[in-house]
Image (cartoon, rainbow, N blue to C red):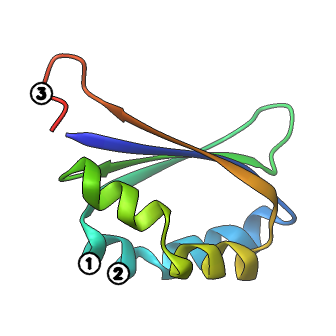
C-alpha cells in the first residue's frame, strides 16, 4: 500500500475540514483508500493528512492534479503544502 502524506497550515480548520470532507468522492475516484487527519497540538490550524492509495502512481497523479490545487486554494490552505510519498516498509513499494 502506498501513502500520501500532506502537511499544511490552513486559515480556518472548520472551513478546510468541510472542503476536505466534501472532496472525498474525488479522492476515492482517484484511487484513495481512506484518510486520517491530524492536527498539531500547538497550532490547531496545522494539519497532517495520511492517505492510503492502491498505487504510488495514482497517489502522485492526484498530488499533482490541478483539481487538488484548486480545492486547497478554496479550502484556505496557507502557503505551500509539504507533500510526501511513502510505503509500508514491510510490503513492496509498488
Q: CA distance from mark 3 to mark 1?
A: 23 Å
Q: Nearer the viewer, mark 1 or mark 2?
A: 1
Q: Are marks 1 and 2 in contact (CB under 8 Å)?
A: yes
Q: Is residue 27 above or below residue 38?
A: below
> Where, quadrant-wise, is the C terminus in this rendering?
top left
Q: Which residue lies under the disc numbered 2?
A: 25
Residue appearing at x 86%, y 31% in the figure: 42
Q: Residue at x 79, y 72 (%)?
A: 76
Disc nearer the start of the sequence (3/1) = 1
The residue singled out by tag 3 in the image is 92
Residue 56's x, y, as percent? 27, 48
> Is 75 above or below relative to 63?
below
Q: Is residue 7 found left or right of 5 in the rendered image?
A: right
Q: Where the N terminus falls, by quadrant?
A: top left
**Mark in the foreground, 2 or 3:** 3
* Residue drawn at the location 74% of the way across and 36% of the way down: 40
Residue 35 in percent (x, y) is at 40, 53
Spatial CA distance of label 1 from label 2 is: 6 Å
Q: In this rendering, would 92 be left or right of 34? A: left
Residue named by callout 1 = 29
Going from N to C along the chain, the mark reached first, 2 or 3, is 2
Amino acid at each position: 500500500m502506498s501513502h500520501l502524506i500532506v502537511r499544511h497550515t490552513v486559515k480556518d480548520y472548520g472551513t478546510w475540514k468541510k472542503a476536505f470532507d466534501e472532496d472525498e468522492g474525488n479522492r476515492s475516484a482517484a484511487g484513495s483508500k481512506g484518510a486520517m487527519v491530524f492536527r498539531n497540538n500547538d497550532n490547531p490550524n496545522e494539519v497532517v493528512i495520511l492517505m492510503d492509495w492502491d498505487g504510488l502512481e495514482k497517489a502522485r497523479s492526484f498530488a499533482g492534479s490541478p483539481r487538488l490545487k484548486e480545492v486547497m486554494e478554496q479550502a484556505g490552505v496557507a502557503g505551500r503544502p509539504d507533500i510526501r510519498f511513502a510505503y509500508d516498509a514491510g510490503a513492496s513499494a509498488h
